[in-house]
């Protein structure tokens, strides 16, 4: 599993962070599917639990040597 932090911001100020782990198939620069689970968070999201599935859709790269994608997450979460 790999991990990622999602920072929720107001303007340029990061006010909350949600950490999740994910596991999927596919290659960088290609479409992929997988699962994710919340590992915790800060502020309002402290103690978050849950998870679900994600789908990454490969998009046309902005220029040679780069890649672009959009990722959709579908799942559930619960706060204490």
Image: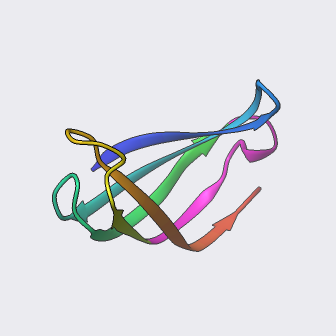
Residue 66 picture quarter:
top left
User: Which residue is located at x 27 percent, y 50 percent?
Assistant: 1
Q: Which residues are magenta?
A: 42-53
Query: 3 or 26: which is nearer to us?
Result: 26
Image height of 80 relative to 4, above or below: below
**Is 6 on the left or on the right of 71, as rendered?**
right
Residue 65 picture quarter:
top left
Picture coordinates of residue 29, whole percent (x, y): 23, 55
User: Which residue is located at x 66 percent, y 53 percent?
Assistant: 48
Picture coordinates of residue 4, whole percent (x, y): 44, 41
Residue 34 picture quarter:
bottom left
**Is 80 on the left or on the right of 49, as rendered?**
right
Residue at the left extreme, as displayed: 27
**Is 25 on the left or on the right of 51, as rendered?**
left
User: Which residue is located at x 37 percent, y 69 percent?
Assistant: 57
Query: 13 or 79: which is nearer to us?
Result: 13
Image height of 5 relative to 77, above or below: above
- Is residue 54 shown in magenta? no
């Amino acid at each position: 599993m790999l991990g990622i932090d999602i920072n929720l911001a107001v303007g340029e100020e990061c006010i909350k962070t949600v950490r999740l782990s994910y596991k999927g198939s596919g290659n960088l620069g290609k479409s992929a599917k997988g699962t994710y689970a919340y590992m915790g968070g800060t502020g309002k999201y402290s103690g978050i639990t849950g998870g679900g599935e994600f789908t990454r859709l490969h998009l046309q790269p902005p220029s040679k040597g780069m890649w672009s994608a959009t990722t959709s997450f579908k799942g559930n979460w619960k706060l204490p």
